[in-house]
Each structure stands twice: as C-alpha cells, then as structure tokens.
Amino acid sequence: MLELRQAFIDNAPQYLAISGLLIGFAFGYIAYRTNFCTMGGVSDALNFGDYRRFRSWILAGAVAIAGTQLLTYGGIVAVENSIYIGSSLNWTGHVFGGLIFGFGMVFAGGCPSRNLARAGGGDLRSLMTLVFVGIFAFASMGGIFGPIRAWLAETTSLPMSQFGAPTTSLADIAVAHGAVSSEISGLAIGFLIAGLFALYCFSSRELRSSPVHIVAGVGVGLCIIAGWAATGLAFDEFTEAPVQPISLTYVRPTGDALDWLQRFTALGLPGFGVTTVFGAILGAFVAARAMGRFRITTFSDVGDTVRSLSGAALMGIGGVMALGCSIGQGLTGISTLAFGSFLSLVAIIIGAIIGLKTLERFA
C-alpha cells in the first residue's frame, strides 16, 4: 500500500486524470444503462408510488458510507481534509442551496449527473443545460453572485464549538458527547447509518425483486468509494498546495470542464473532477450505442428551453451554495458523515418535491 500511495503522489496529475476518466466512465455507463436518477426517483415515488429508483439512490448512499469509512479506518483517505468537514456549519448554504438545487433539477429534467448521461446519449438539450450549470456555478463561486454567497455564509455559519464538537463530522460529534470511542467512531456511526439505509431499501419487496435497481445502487456507491480511494492516495499534505481528497460531484467540475476546454494550453492536464465529467459522457455514449438508443435530440419548444435553462441556472447557484449536488452531497458528502451533507440531502429532496408540485400546477 505504501508503494501504491507513493506512486500516486509521485504521478498525481496523471494518475488522478486517468482515475477520474475511468471512474466517470463507469458512473456514466451505469447511470445510463440502469436509468439511475435522483430526480426520477423522487418523481416516481411522488407521482406513481414507485420507490425503486429512490431506494436505489439511498442504497448507493449506504454502500458509499460503508466503503468510505472503511477506507478512512484503513488510512487510505482522510475525509477530514475534504471540503465537507469543517469547524463551522454553513447551515444557510446547505439548507437554502439544497432547496434551490432540488427545485432547479426538476425544471432542468434532472441533476447534472443525469444530464451528463443524457448528453452522452445524444441529447443536445442536456449539453446546453450543463453549459448553463457551469456558467452559473462559476458566477456563484467567484463571479457576480460570489460576494453575496460568501457574505451569507460568513454571517450565518455556526462554529461547532457551540455544540461542543470540533468539526461537523457526525463521528466527531458522537465522540465529543461520549457516545463512542474515537478509534472506531467513523466505523460505528457509518455502519449504523449505512445499515439503516440498507434496511430501508431491502425492506421493499419491489426493490428486492428488481436486480437492475440493486445493481445501480451498488455500482454507483462503488464509484464513490473508488473516487475517494484515488484522491486519498494522491493526497500529499507536505506539498505547498495539496489537492483536497474528493469523489464524484458534478456542479463545480462541470464549470471546471468548460474552463479547461477554453484554456487547455494554460492549464495542462485536466484534474480529477474534469475527467469525471468527460468520463461520464463517454460512458453514457458507449451504453447508449450498445443499447441502440443513441439519438440526437434537442429542445421541443421555447417553453422547454426556458424551463430547462432556468433550472440549470438554479442548479449552478444552489449547488455551489450547498457545496454539491445530489451526487456531490447526496452521496459523496454523506459518505464522509458530514452533518451539513445530510442537511443538503434532505433539502434537495424537499426542493425536488416543491419543484414537482410547482411544475404540475403550471403545466
């Protein structure tokens, strides 16, 4: 393991670019082949009482949490170095950002990951949606919306010391309040949550009798774990500017991918996040061709255009506020046991429900 870690550290740009491409490819292939979709899962449950795709998403979370905490316990990745765990809780970003993102993904016909899969299948509408997600994500980070977002986060964030804990990690919170020992806190809390998630999923006869949804959940969860393993091995705390460990997330990386396409000669090799974007499109393309479903499609009318692009703008803004999307927070974030990620997860679901009700009302 030490030799593998050293190889990743010594060749971090190359290894991360290749890892991102392969993991993104696997995710895109699985997402297209199994129709894995967060918004679709919420919509199926709300409109048809069919919870299989929703439970598949929750199953992916269970797998991601269990695997990530095993990686952490084994010293392969230090999730405390990620963007998700900090000494303060930006509750407004998680709550309002999640609501905005969830609402927007309904109008955009799916989250960024779903639009990546559709773009790989030839949907030009999804490709344009992704462009708008990237533009508004950058505008919310350091662009025209950046100062407002930063001011809101700074003025409303709550230091975790007020709650008697050093960080936003549920494992650290449990240790601080004497609920579990620090040596096994991640495993204990992680496996408890993962077990409850899995129990919820497999208590459903419909899911148990639907192998495609089980494969989708397990497969996507394994992709999250693989992302943490690759970036965790490449993390070098002794470099001047270490790259934080991360796994799949598709709001900022979509903007980074647009930036890389425009400034390739200045930026050099694409980073992990950028190659996961390209990998997801490529994986979906291969799946679409294999299934005979590749078709060039576009917006149906002006209303469809306005609805999709406005939803994309909301996803870009909300995703940056919440520090991630339905994959970036809903799976990758919660796998670190960050309390804020669970807030974002709930807010995204509620936002999606509100969006579906609103769309139904004005359809």
Image (spheres, grey):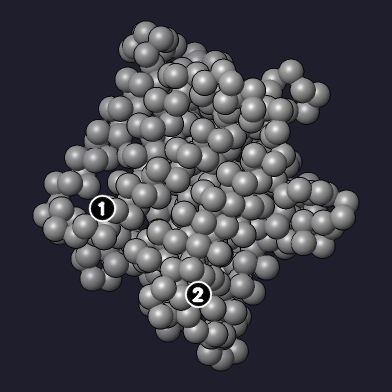
| Left or right relative to 251: residue 359 | left
Q: Is residue 253 above or below residue 29?
A: above
Pick the residue in front: 346 or 338: 338
Pick the residue in front: 171 or 260: 260
Does dot 2 land on a helix, a strand or a loop?
Answer: loop
Q: How many marks?
A: 2
The amino acid marked with disc number 1 is Ile
User: Percent position (x, y) of residue 86?
Assistant: 59, 26
The residue depicted at 74 percent of the width and 18 percent of the height is: 238
The circle drawn on residue 193 is none
The residue depicted at 68 percent of the width and 68 percent of the height is: 131
The amino acid marked with disc number 2 is Gly
The residue depicted at 40 percent of the width and 54 percent of the height is: 349
Quadrant in which residue 84 is drawn: top right
Looking at the rendering, in which quadrant would you find the C terminus? bottom left
Judging by the rendered image, the residue that carries numbered circle 1 is 214
**Residue farthest along the left direction in this orientation:** 205
Judging by the rendered image, the residue that carries numbered circle 2 is 121
Q: Is residue 274 above or below residue 124?
A: above
| Left or right relative to 340: residue 17 | right
The answer to whether marks 2 and 1 mark residues whose Cβ atoms lie closer than 8 Å is no
- Spatial CA distance of label 2 from label 1 is 23 Å
The residue depicted at 71 percent of the width and 28 percent of the height is: 10
